Image (cartoon, rainbow, N blue to C red):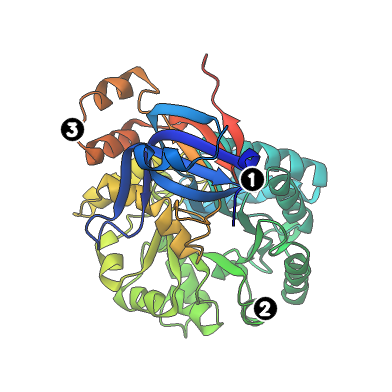
Amino acid sequence: MSIVPSTVQAYRASLLHFHADPAFSKDACLWHEDGLLIVADGKVQAAGDYAQLFATLPDGVRVVDYRGKVIMPGFIDTHLHFPQTDMIASPAPGLLPWLETYTFPTERQFGDPAHAREVADFFLDELLRCGTTTAMVYCTVHRESVDAFFEASAARNLRMAAGKVLMDRNCPEFLRDTAEGGVRDSEDLIKKWHNKGRAMYAITPRFAPTSTEAQLRLTGELAAAYPDTYIQTHVSENADECSWVKSLFPDARSYLDVYDHYGLMRERAMFGHCIWLDDADFARMAETGSAAAICPTSNFFLGSGLFDFEKADAARVSLSLATDVGAGTSFSMLQTMNEAYKVARLKGSYLPAARMFYLATLGAARSMQLEGTIGSFVAGAEADFIVLDPKATPLLARRTERCNNLEELLFALALLGDDRCVGATYAAGRKVHERATDL
């Protein structure tokens, strides 16, 4: 098919993306020191060396010059809560008191569509400022919160997954739904939003303690009826939480087994945290195609524990990184990489920078069954990409001037970088954020 020249966009910079997991494949990175990204109609047409691709451009196409910077696919954040934006950095001695003191009262406000939309707008702009172009997002129990989120996302033409939280016990009455009503509302929202534009619906039981067995059973039936939807929930985040689940579901082999019993483990199922899983749990995740969202800033903040990369990799579980705002303390996936590196070191393993960038792009896309759609620059992928500036701060500039290879450059970005590194963010080929140069 010929490309109409006026629809073509071209960007010159160093290009980085992945075709494999660096933990298991040599030469998993695709790196072009002087690269060219060609986009048309919101999709990638080609990505490679500038010297080879420039001659293929139609006459009259202006090349946007980002030399000195790195263009890579937009970050994908696989676990966070948009209603918790306003309570980020709230003090509490642990997960359960944090929920009771801050989370539930804050979420109460999201029955108000105007409030929900105002927070959604800020939340999405903050993601884009940090270079995140796709996320798996928890709303509240209110249908209005889901409508507000997807309306705000559609206005920016973003590929986002989100869903109404389901919880019919062990929560305040003002946030409690019913087994039947919550699932019925979820199905209505699936019909309204799933695969409409770039929206994707995620069936969202908050976590096992806040759903009755009846609600979990109906949720599993809903997931079976709509197999191309996502499922998102929490599992094995905190030792006290795991003990609570054991008391509520005494017949379950493990916390994860509760979800498995109700048909909630399958491809497109994303489990947040996964800290206290055993070998049998990880094996079952791999067997079912379920994926883990690793949330290091949240786990440090709440003192939940350390994710075991080696155990998960031994089972070949699909992994990705996530901010978990608002228990997570930053919207930045670069800062999330910084903390993930420390988690690995504290568990006695090592996480190379290339692996961290993979987990935040192609690894997350694979976890969401979206390889070829987002997360890389293969031809036909949606043109969601970011421009990273290795000289965004004086310290980063000084360090990157001394980098001798790609791994050192990426490591410096991950350990020293934050939202200031994101010079621009593009969604479906359109610029949706540009950093002010005078900040």
Which amino acid type corresponds to the residue marked 1 in the rendered image? Answer: Val
Quarter of the N terminus within the rendering: bottom right
Q: Which residue is mark 2?
A: 222
Query: Is 207 on the left or on the right of 278, as rendered?
Result: right
Q: Residue 315, image x and y in percent?
A: 29, 73
For label 2, the SS is helix
For label 1, the SS is loop
Asked if one can make out residue 399 in the rendered structure from this viewpoint, the answer is yes
Viewer-side residue, 343 vs 252? 343
For label 3, the SS is loop
User: Dot 1: within a 10 Å radius of its alpha carbon, few (fewer than 14), some, or many (20 or more) residues?
Assistant: few
Viewer-side residue, 303 vs 201? 201
Q: Residue at x 32, y 41 (%)?
A: 32
- Residue 35: image quadrant is top left
Q: Is residue 330 above or below residue 281?
A: above
- Residue 337: image quadrant is top left
Q: Which residue is mark 3?
A: 404
For the residues carrying marks 3 and 2, which lies nearer the camera in this image? 3
* Residue 417: mark: none
For the residues carrying marks 1 and 3, which lies nearer the camera in this image? 1
User: What whole-number distance in Å separates the C-alpha atoms at marks 2 and 1?
Assistant: 44 Å
User: What whole-number distance in Å separates the C-alpha atoms at marks 3 and 2?
Assistant: 52 Å
Q: Residue at x 57, y 68 (%)?
A: 231
Which amino acid type corresponds to the residue marked 2 in the rendered image? Answer: Leu
For the residues carrying marks 2 and 1, which lies nearer the camera in this image? 1
Most extreme residue toward the top is: 438
Q: Which residue is mark 1?
A: 4
Query: Is 334 on the left or on the right of 22, as rendered?
Result: right
Q: Residue 182, image x and y in percent?
A: 74, 69
Q: Residue at x 39, y 30 (%)?
A: 69
Q: Earlier in the sequence, mark 1 or mark 3?
A: 1
